[in-house]
Image (cartoon, rainbow, N blue to C red):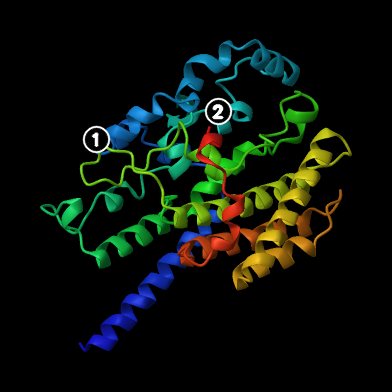
Amino acid sequence: MNKELVLTIAAFQLAIMTNIGLAQLDNPHNDPSKVLGAESCAKCHDAEIAVWKKTPHYDTFKKLHRKPEAKQIAERMGLRSIKRGETCLKCHYTEQDHGGATKAISGISCESCHGASQDWIKIHNDYGGPNISKLQETPEHKTLRREKSIANGMRNPSNLYLVARSCLNCHTTPDENLVNVGQHPTGSLDFELVAWSQGMVHHNFVASDGKHNSPSTTERLRVMYIAGTLADLEFSLRATAQATTKAKFATTSALRANTMRKKLAWIQSHLNHPTLQQAVDAANEVELKLDNKDQLIAAADKIADCGFEFAKTASGTELGAIDALLPDKSKYK
């Protein structure tokens, strides 16, 4: 088989994997029957687990149900337990299936951000053979391993948009009754992906010894900032699409979506990026109003596709025009 044919086949396989990976954009929630738990990640990522255990994400499991404000929200929603029922579980805990019943097994954990791991963990752990270490993996195998992991449901940070979606899927509080009836906060209105991911939850262990938490490069932070803006816009639009009455949830969601589309337009005006222009057009063409669900969801779907493609192809070196937007390290949470 000649070299050109081999390259063509490889490119074709990669395209198939990428298209399958896009399918996970349809459902940002985990399948509890495919959740293995943080212990399955600790075997190789013990340093990352140590960072996680110092965060509010970890403490949620032990503390949230004891907080007076959480109990008040549950009471207003008619919930007997915060740790039971989809309303609270889907964002505040990691769910796992136990004989057909869903159970909280931890707070926001590895799989909350990176996806239920049953279908991809073995792929993620294979560096090219049983006796090949991570340091020995070839660049070609690493690329295929990541693409195949994504195709099987992993929200791999090699595509930052997938991880950004995990954050914004919850940090926009996409539940009308929870906000209007339960009086739950309307998302984290000051959420910004770089600032919120590079502080206490930061675990970018790329050093060869796996023990030193290396900082993200400026190029990566640029991509991250834009991916976060796109994901915020996507889920703000999805929340606006859910609104049925002109109340706090509808108003806040629409205002947030409008803020994000203005920010994205500013970014695009300084970058002139073709993929971002598609996202800007999709956002600007839809009206932020009640009874406009189909159009709002279509716009959100288009922005998700653009976000995935942008994060997959952008190197960051071409994005220096947005450096003024990047938060200073003193702003990291």
Q: As displayed, is residue 69 above or below residue 97?
A: above
| Pointer 1 local density, CA inside 10 Å: few below 14, some 14–19, many at least 20 | few
- The tag on residue 92 is 2
Please provide percent x and percent y for residue 105: 43, 25
- Nearest to the observer: residue 142 or residue 290: 142
SS state under label 2: helix
In the figure, is residue 39 to the left or right of 185?
Answer: left
Residue at point 42%, 42% (across, down): 116
Residue at point 41%, 52% (across, down): 217
- Nearest to the observer: residue 104 or residue 264: 264
| Pointer 2 local density, CA inside 10 Å: few below 14, some 14–19, many at least 20 | many
- Nearest to the observer: residue 313 or residue 326: 326
SS state under label 1: loop
Please provide percent x and percent y for residue 308: 53, 60
In the figure, is residue 254 to the left or right of 165?
Answer: right
The residue under label 1 is which amino acid type?
Lys
Residue at point 54%, 63% (across, down): 319
- Labels 1 & 2 near each other (Cβ < 8 A): no
Residue 275 position by quadrant: bottom right
Quadrant for the N terminus in the image: bottom left
In the figure, is residue 80 to the left or right of 179?
Answer: left
Q: Mark 1 highlights which residue? A: 43
Residue at point 39%, 24% (across, down): 53
Please provide percent x and percent y for residue 26: 58, 54
N-terminal-most mark, 1 or 2: 1
Q: Which residue ends up furthest to the left in the rendered image?
A: 131
Please provide percent x and percent y for residue 5: 28, 86
